[in-house]
Image (cartoon, rainbow, N blue to C red):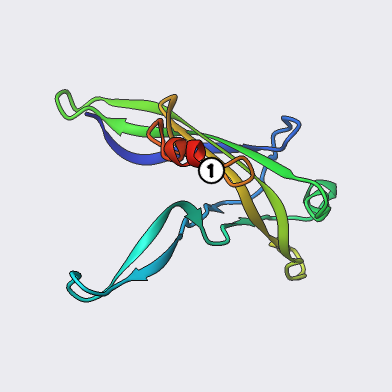
Amino acid sequence: MKIPSVLNTYNVYDNIGNKLIGVANELELPELEAMTDDVDGSGVLGVFADPATGQFESTEMNIKWKWMDARFFRIARTATFSQFTIRGSQQVTDPKTGNTDYWPLKIVVRGKMKSMNLGTLAKAKNINPETVLEVLYLNIKINKEPRLLLDKLNFRYEVNGVDMMKKIRKQV
C-alpha cells in the first residue's frame, strides 16, 4: 500500500480536448451531501439521519479562473453541458523502500453553469472570475482504478467499482 502525499501537478481540458492553460491555481471539487430523512420511533434509541443511497443534494463545483475569454463565456450557455477533464499526477511513497512513485488522477465533471462572478478589475492584476457549475456527472479514477461515478441523469452511482444502484434499478 503506497502512501499518497501530494498532487504533483495537473491540467484541465475542455469538452473538445483543448488544454485550458492557466485556468486557475486551484479547483474546488464538488461536495457530495446525501439526501437524508430522520428515523425514529419504537425500537430505535433516539433519532438518526438515514442517507438515501445514490440520492444527493445539489452538487456544485467552483472553478476559479485567472482571466476571461471565449472559453470562460462558453460555460454561460446554460442550455448545453460543459465538461472538464482534470488530469493530474498524484505523488506517492512506497513505505517499504521510501521511493517516490506517481499515480495518474483523472476526474471528469459535466454540468451546467449555475452562477458566474465576473471578477475584479485592477491594474496589472488577474481578473479572477469564478464559475459555479451544477454537477450532474462526476467520474474519478485514481491509478486507473474507478473510485467514484455519479451520473444523476442516468441513475448511476458507483463506489470503488461497486454499482450501488444495481438492485434499486431492478426494482423500479
User: Pointer 1: residues within 10 angstroms few (<14), some, or many (20+)?
Assistant: few
96 horizontally vs 84: left or right? left
Instruction: Give the residue drawn at x 43%, y 37%.
Output: 167
Of the pair 155 and 159, the residue shown nearer to us:
155
Instruction: Give the residue drawn at x 75%, y 45%.
Output: 81
Of the pair 20 and 166, the residue shown nearer to us:
166
Provide residue 165's location: percent of width, then percent of height: 46, 40
- Kindly identify which residue carries mark 1: 172
Q: Residue 94 appears in which quarter of the rendering? A: top left
Instruction: Give the residue drawn at x 56%, y 52%.
Output: 27
Indicate whether 84 appears above or below 66. Answer: above
Q: Secondary structure at mark 1?
A: loop
Q: Residue 100 appears in which quarter of the rendering? A: top left
The answer to whether residue 149 is visible is no
Provide residue 126's location: percent of width, then percent of height: 71, 60
Provide residue 63's location: percent of width, then percent of height: 63, 55
In the image as oriented, which residue stretches furthest toward the left? Answer: 96
Number of marks drawn: 1
